[in-house]
Amino acid sequence: MKQKRGQKSALKGGERGWLIAVFKGIICGVSFLGCQQPSEPTESAKQFVAIAFEHVLPLQEICDHIPNNAEAADSTLMAERYVDQWIREQVVVHEAENRLPQDLQTFEREIQAYRNALLLHHYKERYVLQRMQQEVPEEEALAYYMEHQDLFILMDYAVRATFLHLPSEDDQDLNFIKSALMAPDTTPSFLLQQWCVEHAAVHSLNTETWWYLEDLIQEVPIELYRTEKQLTNRKLITFDADGRNYFIRFHEHAFIDGVSPFEVVKDRVSELILHGKKQALLIQLEEDLLIQAWEQGNVQKLILD
Protein backbone atom coordinates (compact mmCIF):
# COMPACT_ATOMS: atom_id res chain seq x y z
CA MET A 1 0.00 0.00 0.00
CA LYS A 2 2.82 2.40 0.86
CA GLN A 3 4.44 1.73 -2.46
CA LYS A 4 1.20 2.41 -4.30
CA ARG A 5 0.72 5.66 -2.40
CA GLY A 6 4.25 6.62 -3.35
CA GLN A 7 3.59 5.76 -6.95
CA LYS A 8 0.37 7.73 -6.87
CA SER A 9 2.10 10.74 -5.32
CA ALA A 10 4.89 10.51 -7.86
CA LEU A 11 2.31 10.34 -10.61
CA LYS A 12 0.55 13.44 -9.28
CA GLY A 13 3.87 15.20 -9.03
CA GLY A 14 4.59 14.26 -12.63
CA GLU A 15 1.19 15.49 -13.70
CA ARG A 16 1.77 18.74 -11.85
CA GLY A 17 5.12 19.21 -13.53
CA TRP A 18 3.58 18.54 -16.94
CA LEU A 19 0.73 20.97 -16.26
CA ILE A 20 3.16 23.64 -15.09
CA ALA A 21 5.27 23.15 -18.19
CA VAL A 22 2.21 23.34 -20.42
CA PHE A 23 0.94 26.41 -18.57
CA LYS A 24 4.27 28.17 -18.92
CA GLY A 25 4.30 27.35 -22.59
CA ILE A 26 0.83 28.75 -23.08
CA ILE A 27 1.68 31.88 -21.07
CA CYS A 28 4.77 32.39 -23.22
CA GLY A 29 2.56 31.99 -26.26
CA VAL A 30 0.19 34.56 -24.87
CA SER A 31 3.11 36.93 -24.34
CA PHE A 32 4.61 36.32 -27.76
CA LEU A 33 1.42 36.53 -29.78
CA GLY A 34 -0.15 39.26 -27.67
CA CYS A 35 -3.41 37.27 -27.53
CA GLN A 36 -4.14 37.91 -31.16
CA GLN A 37 -7.29 36.37 -32.54
CA PRO A 38 -6.66 32.85 -33.89
CA SER A 39 -7.21 32.05 -37.55
CA GLU A 40 -10.06 29.75 -36.55
CA PRO A 41 -12.52 31.01 -33.92
CA THR A 42 -12.61 27.69 -32.08
CA GLU A 43 -8.84 27.34 -31.80
CA SER A 44 -8.32 29.14 -28.48
CA ALA A 45 -11.65 27.92 -27.16
CA LYS A 46 -10.29 24.36 -27.23
CA GLN A 47 -7.24 25.28 -25.12
CA PHE A 48 -7.40 25.40 -21.33
CA VAL A 49 -4.82 26.80 -18.96
CA ALA A 50 -6.19 25.67 -15.58
CA ILE A 51 -8.55 23.13 -14.02
CA ALA A 52 -10.20 23.40 -10.61
CA PHE A 53 -12.86 21.00 -9.34
CA GLU A 54 -14.05 20.05 -12.83
CA HIS A 55 -14.17 23.68 -13.94
CA VAL A 56 -11.82 24.76 -16.74
CA LEU A 57 -10.33 28.13 -17.62
CA PRO A 58 -10.16 28.63 -21.42
CA LEU A 59 -7.19 30.36 -22.95
CA GLN A 60 -9.56 32.73 -24.75
CA GLU A 61 -10.84 34.07 -21.43
CA ILE A 62 -7.32 35.15 -20.52
CA CYS A 63 -6.80 36.66 -23.96
CA ASP A 64 -9.97 38.71 -23.54
CA HIS A 65 -8.46 40.38 -20.47
CA ILE A 66 -5.05 41.20 -21.96
CA PRO A 67 -4.69 44.24 -24.29
CA ASN A 68 -3.31 43.39 -27.72
CA ASN A 69 -0.69 46.12 -27.41
CA ALA A 70 0.64 44.90 -24.05
CA GLU A 71 4.36 44.21 -23.74
CA ALA A 72 5.43 40.56 -23.50
CA ALA A 73 6.51 40.85 -19.86
CA ASP A 74 3.28 42.63 -18.95
CA SER A 75 1.19 40.01 -20.78
CA THR A 76 2.91 37.22 -18.86
CA LEU A 77 2.36 38.95 -15.53
CA MET A 78 -1.31 39.73 -16.27
CA ALA A 79 -1.95 36.17 -17.45
CA GLU A 80 -0.35 34.62 -14.38
CA ARG A 81 -2.28 36.90 -12.05
CA TYR A 82 -5.56 36.15 -13.80
CA VAL A 83 -5.01 32.39 -13.60
CA ASP A 84 -3.99 32.57 -9.93
CA GLN A 85 -7.06 34.64 -9.08
CA TRP A 86 -9.33 32.30 -11.03
CA ILE A 87 -8.00 29.25 -9.20
CA ARG A 88 -8.35 31.00 -5.84
CA GLU A 89 -11.96 31.91 -6.63
CA GLN A 90 -12.84 28.38 -7.74
CA VAL A 91 -11.39 26.90 -4.56
CA VAL A 92 -13.42 29.22 -2.33
CA VAL A 93 -16.60 28.74 -4.40
CA HIS A 94 -16.19 24.97 -4.15
CA GLU A 95 -15.90 25.24 -0.38
CA ALA A 96 -19.01 27.45 -0.24
CA GLU A 97 -20.98 24.96 -2.34
CA ASN A 98 -20.10 22.16 0.05
CA ARG A 99 -20.65 24.09 3.27
CA LEU A 100 -23.75 26.23 2.60
CA PRO A 101 -27.23 24.69 2.99
CA GLN A 102 -28.82 23.90 -0.33
CA ASP A 103 -31.52 26.55 0.04
CA LEU A 104 -28.86 29.26 0.27
CA GLN A 105 -27.25 28.20 -3.00
CA THR A 106 -30.26 29.02 -5.21
CA PHE A 107 -29.30 32.38 -6.66
CA GLU A 108 -30.83 32.02 -10.10
CA ARG A 109 -33.40 34.76 -9.57
CA GLU A 110 -30.87 37.13 -8.04
CA ILE A 111 -28.38 36.43 -10.84
CA GLN A 112 -31.02 36.96 -13.53
CA ALA A 113 -32.19 40.19 -11.87
CA TYR A 114 -28.62 41.46 -11.68
CA ARG A 115 -27.98 40.53 -15.31
CA ASN A 116 -31.16 42.30 -16.42
CA ALA A 117 -30.26 45.40 -14.42
CA LEU A 118 -26.76 45.44 -15.89
CA LEU A 119 -28.04 45.07 -19.46
CA LEU A 120 -30.70 47.73 -18.98
CA HIS A 121 -28.26 50.18 -17.43
CA HIS A 122 -25.71 49.95 -20.24
CA TYR A 123 -28.32 49.91 -23.01
CA LYS A 124 -30.20 52.91 -21.62
CA GLU A 125 -27.02 54.90 -21.08
CA ARG A 126 -25.90 54.26 -24.66
CA TYR A 127 -29.39 54.98 -26.00
CA VAL A 128 -29.50 58.33 -24.22
CA LEU A 129 -25.98 59.34 -25.25
CA GLN A 130 -26.78 58.66 -28.90
CA ARG A 131 -30.03 60.63 -28.91
CA MET A 132 -29.74 63.49 -26.42
CA GLN A 133 -27.52 66.53 -26.32
CA GLN A 134 -25.57 66.80 -23.08
CA GLU A 135 -25.42 70.60 -23.01
CA VAL A 136 -28.31 72.86 -22.05
CA PRO A 137 -28.55 76.29 -23.77
CA GLU A 138 -28.40 79.12 -21.26
CA GLU A 139 -31.74 80.49 -22.43
CA GLU A 140 -33.41 77.16 -21.68
CA ALA A 141 -31.70 76.90 -18.31
CA LEU A 142 -32.72 80.44 -17.36
CA ALA A 143 -36.34 79.81 -18.39
CA TYR A 144 -36.42 76.66 -16.24
CA TYR A 145 -34.88 78.56 -13.32
CA MET A 146 -37.47 81.33 -13.54
CA GLU A 147 -40.32 78.82 -13.67
CA HIS A 148 -39.09 76.68 -10.77
CA GLN A 149 -37.57 79.15 -8.34
CA ASP A 150 -39.09 77.27 -5.41
CA LEU A 151 -36.49 74.56 -6.08
CA PHE A 152 -33.59 76.95 -5.51
CA ILE A 153 -34.11 78.40 -2.06
CA LEU A 154 -30.83 79.18 -0.32
CA MET A 155 -29.84 77.23 2.78
CA ASP A 156 -26.71 79.37 3.23
CA TYR A 157 -25.68 82.91 2.37
CA ALA A 158 -24.27 83.38 -1.12
CA VAL A 159 -21.85 86.14 -2.05
CA ARG A 160 -19.84 87.40 -4.98
CA ALA A 161 -16.45 88.26 -3.54
CA THR A 162 -12.81 88.83 -4.39
CA PHE A 163 -10.00 88.18 -1.93
CA LEU A 164 -6.34 87.45 -1.44
CA HIS A 165 -4.10 86.65 1.51
CA LEU A 166 -0.37 86.34 2.10
CA PRO A 167 2.09 86.07 5.02
CA SER A 168 2.06 89.08 7.35
CA GLU A 169 5.79 89.69 6.92
CA ASP A 170 5.25 90.24 3.20
CA ASP A 171 3.85 93.73 3.76
CA GLN A 172 5.21 95.35 0.62
CA ASP A 173 2.85 96.84 -1.95
CA LEU A 174 -0.11 96.93 0.48
CA ASN A 175 -1.35 100.18 -0.99
CA PHE A 176 -1.22 98.68 -4.47
CA ILE A 177 -3.25 95.66 -3.27
CA LYS A 178 -5.90 97.84 -1.66
CA SER A 179 -6.27 100.19 -4.61
CA ALA A 180 -6.41 97.29 -7.10
CA LEU A 181 -9.10 95.45 -5.14
CA MET A 182 -11.21 98.61 -4.94
CA ALA A 183 -10.73 99.63 -8.59
CA PRO A 184 -13.92 99.68 -10.71
CA ASP A 185 -12.27 98.50 -13.95
CA THR A 186 -10.40 95.31 -14.87
CA THR A 187 -6.92 96.71 -15.57
CA PRO A 188 -5.74 96.92 -11.95
CA SER A 189 -7.27 93.46 -11.36
CA PHE A 190 -5.14 92.04 -14.19
CA LEU A 191 -2.02 93.65 -12.72
CA LEU A 192 -2.97 92.33 -9.28
CA GLN A 193 -3.41 88.84 -10.75
CA GLN A 194 0.17 88.98 -12.02
CA TRP A 195 1.39 90.30 -8.66
CA CYS A 196 -0.33 87.43 -6.79
CA VAL A 197 1.27 84.84 -9.04
CA GLU A 198 4.71 86.37 -8.62
CA HIS A 199 4.33 86.56 -4.82
CA ALA A 200 2.54 83.20 -4.35
CA ALA A 201 -0.44 84.92 -2.76
CA VAL A 202 -3.63 82.88 -2.37
CA HIS A 203 -6.27 84.71 -4.35
CA SER A 204 -9.62 84.71 -6.13
CA LEU A 205 -10.01 87.88 -8.18
CA ASN A 206 -12.84 87.04 -10.56
CA THR A 207 -15.66 89.38 -9.60
CA GLU A 208 -18.23 87.05 -11.18
CA THR A 209 -17.42 84.12 -8.88
CA TRP A 210 -20.11 83.23 -6.35
CA TRP A 211 -19.36 81.54 -3.05
CA TYR A 212 -21.46 79.94 -0.38
CA LEU A 213 -20.46 81.77 2.78
CA GLU A 214 -19.49 78.56 4.56
CA ASP A 215 -17.03 77.72 1.77
CA LEU A 216 -15.67 81.25 1.62
CA ILE A 217 -14.89 81.28 5.34
CA GLN A 218 -12.73 78.20 4.79
CA GLU A 219 -10.57 80.37 2.54
CA VAL A 220 -10.90 83.67 4.41
CA PRO A 221 -11.62 83.23 8.14
CA ILE A 222 -13.54 86.47 8.50
CA GLU A 223 -15.55 86.90 11.72
CA LEU A 224 -19.14 87.92 11.07
CA TYR A 225 -21.17 89.25 14.01
CA ARG A 226 -24.00 90.93 12.11
CA THR A 227 -23.84 88.81 9.01
CA GLU A 228 -26.49 90.38 6.82
CA LYS A 229 -25.31 93.93 7.49
CA GLN A 230 -21.66 93.04 6.97
CA LEU A 231 -22.38 91.26 3.68
CA THR A 232 -23.98 94.43 2.30
CA ASN A 233 -20.76 96.36 2.93
CA ARG A 234 -18.96 96.97 -0.36
CA LYS A 235 -15.80 98.41 1.21
CA LEU A 236 -12.53 96.55 1.31
CA ILE A 237 -12.14 94.53 4.53
CA THR A 238 -8.63 93.83 5.84
CA PHE A 239 -7.54 91.84 8.88
CA ASP A 240 -4.74 89.65 10.24
CA ALA A 241 -5.17 86.04 11.36
CA ASP A 242 -2.69 83.25 12.01
CA GLY A 243 0.25 85.21 10.65
CA ARG A 244 -1.41 86.20 7.37
CA ASN A 245 -2.83 89.43 5.93
CA TYR A 246 -6.33 89.03 4.49
CA PHE A 247 -8.08 91.30 1.99
CA ILE A 248 -11.68 90.69 0.98
CA ARG A 249 -14.40 92.64 -0.77
CA PHE A 250 -18.06 91.67 -1.20
CA HIS A 251 -19.64 92.63 -4.54
CA GLU A 252 -23.11 91.08 -4.25
CA HIS A 253 -25.03 88.95 -1.78
CA ALA A 254 -28.10 86.73 -1.37
CA PHE A 255 -29.60 85.85 2.00
CA ILE A 256 -30.74 82.56 3.49
CA ASP A 257 -34.32 81.56 2.54
CA GLY A 258 -34.11 83.76 -0.55
CA VAL A 259 -33.97 82.53 -4.12
CA SER A 260 -30.47 81.55 -5.13
CA PRO A 261 -28.88 83.65 -7.89
CA PHE A 262 -28.99 81.88 -11.25
CA GLU A 263 -25.19 81.79 -11.52
CA VAL A 264 -24.97 79.85 -8.26
CA VAL A 265 -27.34 77.07 -9.33
CA LYS A 266 -26.74 77.10 -13.08
CA ASP A 267 -25.07 73.67 -13.08
CA ARG A 268 -27.85 72.21 -10.93
CA VAL A 269 -30.49 73.65 -13.27
CA SER A 270 -28.77 71.96 -16.22
CA GLU A 271 -28.64 68.66 -14.34
CA LEU A 272 -32.36 68.83 -13.57
CA ILE A 273 -33.23 69.61 -17.18
CA LEU A 274 -31.05 66.79 -18.52
CA HIS A 275 -32.47 64.35 -15.96
CA GLY A 276 -36.01 65.25 -17.00
CA LYS A 277 -35.21 64.83 -20.69
CA LYS A 278 -33.48 61.52 -20.02
CA GLN A 279 -36.44 60.13 -18.08
CA ALA A 280 -38.89 61.25 -20.76
CA LEU A 281 -36.73 59.67 -23.48
CA LEU A 282 -36.50 56.34 -21.62
CA ILE A 283 -40.22 56.24 -20.86
CA GLN A 284 -40.96 56.82 -24.55
CA LEU A 285 -38.50 54.06 -25.45
CA GLU A 286 -40.27 51.58 -23.16
CA GLU A 287 -43.68 52.56 -24.53
CA ASP A 288 -42.55 52.19 -28.16
CA LEU A 289 -40.95 48.80 -27.50
CA LEU A 290 -44.02 47.59 -25.62
CA ILE A 291 -46.39 48.61 -28.42
CA GLN A 292 -44.13 46.96 -30.99
CA ALA A 293 -43.93 43.73 -28.97
CA TRP A 294 -47.74 43.53 -28.63
CA GLU A 295 -48.28 44.27 -32.31
CA GLN A 296 -45.82 41.56 -33.36
CA GLY A 297 -47.35 39.03 -30.97
CA ASN A 298 -44.14 38.60 -28.98
CA VAL A 299 -45.87 39.01 -25.62
CA GLN A 300 -49.16 37.86 -24.16
CA LYS A 301 -50.90 38.15 -20.86
CA LEU A 302 -52.42 34.98 -19.49
CA ILE A 303 -55.59 35.31 -17.42
CA LEU A 304 -55.50 33.15 -14.32
CA ASP A 305 -58.69 31.40 -13.22
Image (spheres, helix red, strand yellow):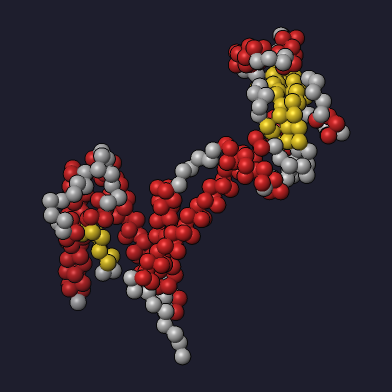
Q: Can residue 174 be seen in this view?
A: no
Q: Residue furthest bottom?
A: 305
Q: Is residue 281 visible?
A: yes
The image shows a total of numbered marks equal to: 0
In the image, taking residue 16 as reference, residue 237 lies left or right, namely right
Q: Nearer the viewer, residue 78 or 11?
A: 78
Q: Residue furthest left?
A: 39
Question: In the figure, residue 238 lies in which quadrant?
Answer: top right
Question: In the figure, residue 99 lies in which quadrant?
Answer: bottom left
Q: Nearer the viewer, residue 182 or 58?
A: 182
In the image, taking residue 16 as reference, residue 142 lies left or right, namely right
**Residue at x 42%, y 75% (from the top left corner):** 106
Give percent across and percent down for residue 129. Answer: 42, 47
Above or below for 239 versus 118: above
Give percent across and percent down for residue 66. Answer: 28, 47
**Residue at x 69%, y 21% (from the top left corner):** 164
In the image, taking residue 166 as reference, residue 270 lies left or right, namely left
Question: In the figure, residue 57 lies in which quadrant?
Answer: bottom left
Give percent across and percent down for residue 96. Answer: 41, 70
**Residue at x 20%, y 65% (from the top left corner):** 12
Above or below for 186 versus 12: above
Give percent across and percent down for residue 196. Answer: 63, 16
Name the quarter where the N terminus is drawn. Answer: bottom left
**Residue at x 62%, y 39% (from the top left corner):** 142
Above or below for 262 versus 84: above
Q: Which of 4 and 300 is in front in this view?
A: 300
